[in-house]
Amino acid sequence: MKKTDELRKKLSYERKNFWNEATAAEQKKAFKFSEGYKNFLNACKTERESIDFYVKELSKQGYREIENGKKSKKVFRISRHKNAGIALIGKKPISEGVNIIVSHIDAPRVDLKQNPLYEDGTTALGMMKTHYYGGIKKYQWMSTPLALHGTIVKKNGETIKICIGEDEKDPVFVMPDLLPHLARKVQYTKKLGEAVDAGMMNVVFSSIPYPKDKETKEAVKLNTLVLLNEKYGITEADFLSAEIEIVPAGKARDAGFDRSLVLGYGQDDRICAYTSASAIFTAKEDLERTAIVYLADKEEIGSDGNTGAKSIFIIDFIADLLKHNGESNDSSNLRKTLINSQVLSADVNAGINPNFPSVHEKENAVHIGYGVSVTKFTGSGGKSGSNDANAEFNSKIIDVYNAEKVNWQIGALGKVDEGGGGTIAKFMAEHGSEVIDCGPGVLGMHSLYELTSKADIYSSYKAYKAFFENA
Ligand code: MN
Ligand code: MN
C-alpha cells in the first residue's frame, strides 16, 4: 500500500458499504432477517396491529405482564392497545439506569372522518370523507389501491376489528384522481402541494342502490348500511366513535434485481420497532443494565395524547419496574433512575435520494446500504427543537458499535435550512437521560412505499442489540 493510502486509511473517516465489508455469512443473515421483517410489516399496518403482534410474540418469548405480580426478568405492559413497554431486567440495580430504545408504531396515513359516509348527488356513488394523519403528500394517495383497518366499539361495548383490502379476495378502495386531459386548470396551474386538497380525498365505497324502492333517498348509502349491518352488526352511528385507518393495500416486497432492498408501507418507524424488539428478544439474558423497548404512538402528529411519547406511560412503567425489582420507586429514586438512563431514539433518517441530491449534503447525510445512522441532532432553523446529543454519549455509542463490528455511519437530516424534522429524542431527554437518535436511512419517507436496504435493517438490529448488551 502506498504511504498516502496508509495515512488516509489511518486518519480519515470514510463510511463503509455493508456489502463490501460483510462476510458472505453476514450478508446471508441480513437477507434472512428481512424475511421476518417483511412478515411483520404485512401483519402490522397500524399501531394497534403492531401491539397485537407483539402481545402474541411476548408470550412466546416468555414475557409476563408486570401486573401479574410474579417475579420475572422478562416483563411488559401494554397501554390502550397502542403502547408497549418491554423490559429485560439486568443484574445491576435499575436505579443505576436503564437502556431504553424508543420507536414509534404509528405511520402517516389517512383516517376516516367520524361521520364519513355520504352519497354523491350527481354521480350516485357512495363516498367516504377522510382526514389525513401526519405529514403526507396528498397527491400520492390518489388512484392507488387502499385498505381499511380499524376498530369499532359498538353500543353494547363489543369491539370489532376490521381489515378489508389486504387479502387478495378482498375488495379494495380508492380515491380517484383527475384525468390529465382535464387537469389543466384545476391542477396544473397549482403548486404541487395544492393540486390535491384534503377535501378531494374522498374514497369510493359502493355504487349499487338499495333495490326495493327506486324513490329511496341515498339508496346507495342505504344499501351499504344494510350490507354492513348484516356483516358486522353495525349502524351508521357506530362510525362516529370508530378509529378507521386507510393505508396502501398490499404487501411489502423485495426491491431491485439483487433483492437487496425492501419496499413497503409504514417502515417509518416500524423498521425500528421490529429491529429493537428483535434485539431485546435475542439479547443475552444476563445483561448488566436493564433493557427496555418502548413502542410509542402518535409520533407523526407531535407525540401528544396519552399514547404518545409525551405521556407519563414510560415513566410509570419504569417506576413499576423499580418496585418489581425490590427497589424504592419514590419520586427521588425514579428521577435518579431516569437521569442515569441511556436512550436510543430509534427512528428513520432520510437517505440520499439520487433523484433529488440537492437537498442533501453528502458528507453528513445518510447513505443507503452504509449501515445504521448515528444522528447527533435533528430539528430545523439552527437545530431548533432538537435534542442534540452530548459528545460523551455520542462517542460512547460509536465505541460500542465499533467494538461489536456494527456497520454504522453518521447522518443528519438534509442540508442546513433545507427543511427539517424531529423525533421522540427531545421528549425522552426531558427526563434527564442521555439520548441520541439512531436508525436506518429511508428513501421516499412518508410515501406509500418507502424503500430501505436490507444492510441497514440488519445493521440497525445489530446496533440495538449491542446497545443493550454493551452500553
Ligand atoms: Mn419516524
Ligand atoms: Mn415520520
Image (tube, rainbow, N blue to C red):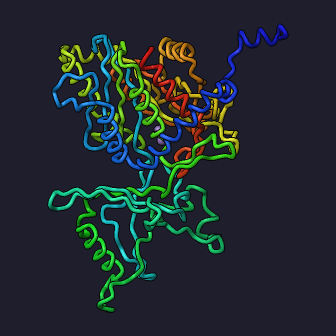
Horizontal relation, residue 14 to residue 136: left or right: right
User: What residue is drawn where x is 31% and y is 12%?
Assistant: 91
What is the tally of numbered marks visible in this picture?
A: 0
- The answer to whether residue 220 is above or below residue 194 is below
Expressed as whole percent of the image width and height from the top left, the position of residue 385 reads 45, 30
The quarter of the displayed image where residue 25 is located: top right
Expressed as whole percent of the image width and height from the top left, the position of residue 323 reads 18, 19
The quarter of the picture where the C terminus appears is top left
Can you see residue 69? Answer: yes
User: What residue is drawn where x is 49% and y is 66%?
Assistant: 175
Q: Residue furthest front?
A: 25
The quarter of the picture where the N terminus appears is top right
Horizontal relation, residue 132 to residue 391: left or right: left
Expressed as whole percent of the image width and height from the top left, the position of residue 69 reads 16, 27
Can you see residue 433? Answer: no
User: What residue is drawn where x is 71% and y is 14%?
Assistant: 12
